[in-house]
Image (cartoon, helix red, strand yellow):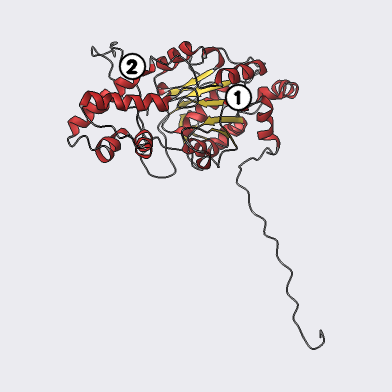
Amino acid sequence: MDCCSFTSSSSLVPPIPTPHRTALPRKIQFSRLRPARNRRLIVNRASGSDGKDSGNGFPAIPKPVFIEEAIGAEYGEGFETFRMDGPLKVDVDYLNDKLQESFLQRIRHAMKPDEAFGLIFSWDNVVADTHSLKLDTWRQLALEEGKDMPCDDHMQRTILQAAADHVLIKVLRWVKEESELERLKLRLSEIYYENILKLDGPVEGLREWLDALHTAGIPCAIVSCLERRHMVEALQRMGLKKYFQAVVAEEDGMESMAHRFLSAAIKLDRKPSKCVVFEDDPRGITAAHNCTMMAVALIGVHPAYDLVQADLAVASFRELSVINLRRLFAHRGSGFMDLQKQIIEKSPPKRKLTVDTI
């Protein structure tokens, strides 16, 4: 994984000015991730396919976007960076400790408590309707290859949620050779990026919700595995660019959902425990909770009974108001989701029945 800096010029608009910065180092260089469990985390980068030169004389090749991402951020897992005084472990606990508010920030947030929150939006099915976009991509690929695309709802849900390799080999059974698999995956990514150019509007109710957040001064970030230029161009076409102070994209080199959420929290200069993630995927909700963040689920692609672990589930952004954010944290103390030792009270010794007792 390439080293990345969370203080790069990736913000769309300047962040909310604060008199003093936090105690977090000005520039954190994250090297290779060392997970708590010895497993391979899926890393895929989504480059564009507009025919531009990639820098080595060849046109840019789009990389797979139909992938099954790792959740990430299990307890004890984090980033490791090296400094002059030795290695530094950067994980959820570290960020919650270092991203503390300064004295003047606390005064400002006491007068305007909504500004203390940080909102993180996922790209897929939260900002843009990528469910229909990806389904049309598979249909177009099937038409080009002369294959049959299943119409069953359960089969289509499996196709959209699984990785392209698994779908092409195990589900659709379109390929048997490795060369043919790579060709179809490349063409699938090309079609997807072509379809992104057709996006002209966000999810219903999102624009009004973002406008309310902008009025309240709440900073927002958007996360995705797509390339940054595609994200910015799509946000410009949909008229949403001014609402997002930070963008976490492929260039940031994040290896899981949770690590993108942590990257967004750093760019927003907010503690993870003060952030709210807007997701439509149960796995994304789990990743948010692993980062000690709140999770608001958008019912649609997944039914409500699959999203019960979310702190709040809504059918549309029109159901939300800024007061909902305050209520999410109303019953949470400063030690939200911290590991606690359970105190077991010792029961009094049982009385023994004797002749005198009777």
The residue depicted at 43 percent of the width and 22 percent of the height is: 249
* Up-down relation of residue 354 to residue 68 (above or below): below
Q: Disc 2 designates what residue?
A: 194
> What amino acid type is highlighted by mark number 1?
Arg
Q: Residue furthest bottom?
A: 355
Q: Circles 2 and 1: CB distance less than 8 Å? A: no
The residue depicted at 23 percent of the width and 38 percent of the height is: 173
The crowding category of the residue bearing disc 1, from other C-alpha atoms within 10 Å (few below 14, some 14 to 19, many at least 20), is few
Q: Quadrant of the C terminus?
A: bottom right
> What amino acid type is highlighted by mark number 2?
Glu
**Image spot of residue 174 (x, y percent):** 22, 34
Sooner in the amino-acid sequence: mark 2 or mark 1? 2
Quadrant of residue 193 in the image?
A: top left
Side (left or right) of 68 relative to 314: left
- The answer to whether residue 353 of the structure is visible from this angle is yes
For the image, the number of numbered tags is 2
**Image spot of residue 355 (x, y percent):** 79, 89
The crowding category of the residue bearing disc 2, from other C-alpha atoms within 10 Å (few below 14, some 14 to 19, many at least 20), is some
Q: Disc 1 designates what residue?
A: 318
Real-space Cα separation, disc 2 to disc 1, in angstroms: 30 Å
The residue depicted at 28 percent of the width and 12 percent of the height is: 51
Quadrant of residue 347 in the image?
A: bottom right
Side (left or right) of 222 relative to 274: left
- The answer to whether residue 23 of the structure is visible from this angle is no
Side (left or right) of 47 relative to 110: left
